[in-house]
Structure formats: structure tokens, C-alpha cells
Amino acid sequence: GGGGGGGGGGGGFLPLETGTSLYLPCTYTLLSRLLPRRHTLVSGRRVCELGSGLGLLSCLLQRLRPPPARLVATDGDPSVLPLLSANLAANRADPAEADQA
């Protein structure tokens, strides 16, 4: 096990799971720590994450304040799309939380 790291919008992330396994490539971990510090690179812009897998970066990006103007997350493997969608929904910033940011 292990957690999904801290992030930009306050609060932690739910683990990104594929049933019994947790998959966090080191590049995701690195970017999840760097992006909140440099959020102006994506805040207010249109962002497309290709090869999103389970959506760790997209989960982080949607919680940044201000968030991207539009975020598209997709993957070439159709079998991960339901998990990607579920992870994005589970980690979406609470509107009340966004109002406080």
C-alpha cells in the first residue's frame, strides 16, 4: 500500500488502485510534488494528459487553485478508462473547499 501524495488544493488524494495493486510510477510522484509549486504553468490553461493511466496527475491538476481552464484525461487502453473516470470523480475538489482556497 501507500498513499497518493499531498497536493495543491489542500487535503490528500485517495489511492489510485487497480483492484489489489497500487501503481505509482516515480515520474508521477515527482510531478505530483513539483506541479503544486509551479501551478501557474497550467492554471487557467487547457491541459490534455495523454496516457493518463489511473489519472494521478489529472487528479492533482483538477485540485489546483486556480485549476486548469479545461482538463482532458485519456488513455489508449480502454480497460483503464472506467478506473480513470472513477479516480477523477473521487478526487474532484469539493466546491466548498474551492471557495475557501
Image (cartoon, rainbow, N blue to C red):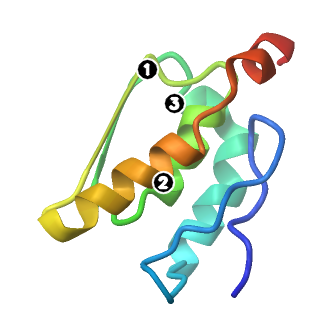
In this view, 51 is above or below 59: below
Q: Residue at x 66, y 59 (%)?
A: 14
Q: Which mark is residue 87?
A: 2
Q: For the residues carrying marks 2 and 3, which lies nearer the camera in this image? A: 2
- The amino acid beneath tag 3 is Val
Which residue in the structure is indicated by mark 3?
A: 42
SS at badge 3: loop
Q: Position of residue 49 (x, y in %)?
A: 33, 47
Q: Position of residue 75 (x, y in %)?
A: 21, 58
- Which of the two residues, 66 or 15, is positioned nearer the viewer here? 15
Q: Residue furthest front?
A: 19
Residue 69 placement: quadrant? top left
- Quadrant location of the C terminus? top right
Disc 1/disc 2 C-alpha distance (Å): 22 Å
SS at badge 1: loop
Q: Position of residue 35 (x, y in %)?
A: 64, 47
Label 1 packing within 10 angstroms: few (<14), some (14-19), many (20+) = some
Which residue in the structure is indicated by mark 1?
A: 45
Q: Is residue 45 left or right of residue 49?
A: right
SS at badge 2: helix
